[in-house]
Amino acid sequence: MYRLMKATHEYGAGTATYYQTSSKSLEVIMDLLATMREDCEKMAAGDLHELMRAWEIYHRIWTVESHLRHIQYRKETRYPGFYYQADYPGQDDENWFCFVNSKYDPEKGEWDVFKKDYIKIIKD
């Protein structure tokens, strides 16, 4: 859990970098997540509480990876307070005023990240 938090804070637009990241930082954390996922295969639990904690760590890795893939896909900065993409410092509403969704195919081991239109259902 602490390894995941440290990696996220330092490379995944966390508090250590004041919510700023870059393409290279995102590549680094993706490698770290792969290593953590391999390490999870060696986890063991002595009781139900430890089993719950082990599953929680495994689930957090998937959640963090999904979130970071969305940041990688979106070529802009989302501010204030979400994250700052150093490679793409501006907010680009013309191209990125949309939702970013993803799916993971476990058979292929691949992520599919894609845009979905934002449809305003409540008028101003």
Image (spheres, grey):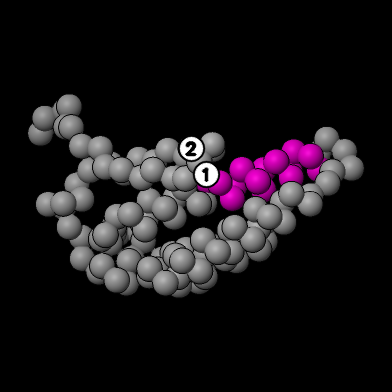
The spot of residue 89 in percent (x, y) is: 25, 69
Q: Residue furthest top?
A: 121
Query: Magenta stretch: dominant SS?
Result: helix
Quadrant of the drawing holding the N terminus: bottom right
Outermost front residue: 108
Disc 1 + disc 2, Cβ < 8 Å: yes
In the rendered view, does 83 fall on the left or right side of 66?
Answer: left
SS type, badge 2: strand
- Which residues make up the magenta segment? 50-63
Tell me: 72 left or right of 94: right
Residue bearing mark 1: 109
Check residue 20 in the rendering and tell me which mark sits there, or answer none: none
Asked if residue 60 lies in the magenta stretch, the reply is yes
The foreground one among 18 and 63 is 63
Residue 62 shown in magenta: yes
| Quadrant assignment, res 100 | top left
Q: Position of residue 120 (x, y in %)?
A: 16, 32
Disc sitting over residue 105 in the figure: 2
